[in-house]
Amino acid sequence: MNPLIAKEPKSVPEFTKKQIDWLTDIAFYYDDKPEPCDAVFVFGGTHPGHWEKAIEAYHMGLSSTFVVTGGVSPTGKKHASWEERTAPESHVIRRKIMEAGVPEESIFFEDRSSNSMENVIYALDEFDFTMINSLLVITKEHGAGRQIRTLQKHLPETVRFVPFGFPAVYSGEGITRDNWHLTPEGRSRVWGEYLRICKYGDAGHLRGILAEERML
């Protein structure tokens, strides 16, 4: 995967309205509404949204089965509210959702991963995805496209993915599919996601974008 693509690339092109709409669907995935699914996949991370959305899904009755991922990222910056600096992400997320009422026996987890592809690869050792037809995916909104494309690459083609994201807040408002193009930070973050989708798709880590469809 090296060299790594910056989370906020410094060089960002100007976008047309058509390109904004296209990049929105690429980065945020399609604007599906949350609906009941056979299981919930929680991508690893230290943002409270990872467990808050899982708890919300449980209380909404969207699923009673959870696959929680995340080890200790060697390079990832921790969220300001993250207190357990050396704890695997999945351990904290699992504890938080159990405290909110999710039964321990309903949670499958892996704690070895350090990136999104490993979240998926190691989860395959803990949960049989051939037994489900739909998966609710909890992720940062602007990372949903990349992470769902990672799931699509490694999980059975019969599984349907439904995003259930949360807006990541870096400064000011959270980045959403409706406002990302209005700020330099939002444009840079989404452009970085697009570049990673291209790079990791070429490396075979996720379902990539066809060359003739790319902006570059």
Image (cartoon, rainbow, N blue to C red):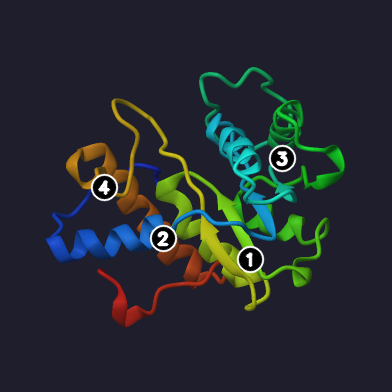
The residue at which mark 4 appears reads as 178
Please state which amino acid type lies under the numbered disc 2.
Tyr
> Quick check: marks 1 and 3 in contact, CB under 8 Å?
no
Q: Which quarter of the figure has residue 102? A: top right
- Label 4: few (<14), some or many (≥20) within 10 Å? few
Please state which amino acid type lies under the numbered disc 4.
Asp
Residue in view at x 27 percent, y 65 percent? 22
Q: Earlier in the sequence, mark 4 or mark 2?
A: 2
Q: CA distance from mark 4 to mark 1?
A: 26 Å
Q: Which quarter of the figure has residue 172? A: top left
Q: Quadrant of the N terminus?
A: bottom right
Question: Which of the two marks, 1 or 2, is nearer to us in this view?
Answer: 1
Q: CA distance from mark 4 to mark 2?
A: 13 Å
Judge whether residue 142 can be spotted in this image.
yes
Question: Which of the two marks, 4 or 3, is nearer to us in this view?
Answer: 4
The residue at which mark 1 appears reads as 134
Q: CA distance from mark 1 to mark 3?
A: 25 Å
The residue at which mark 2 appears reads as 29
Disc 4 on helix, strand or loop? loop
The residue at which mark 3 appears reads as 71
Disc 2 on helix, strand or loop? loop
State the image coordinates of residue 148 (x, y, percent, origin top left).
Answer: 53, 61
Q: Nearer the viewer, residue 214 or 172?
A: 172
Q: CA distance from mark 2 to mark 3?
A: 25 Å
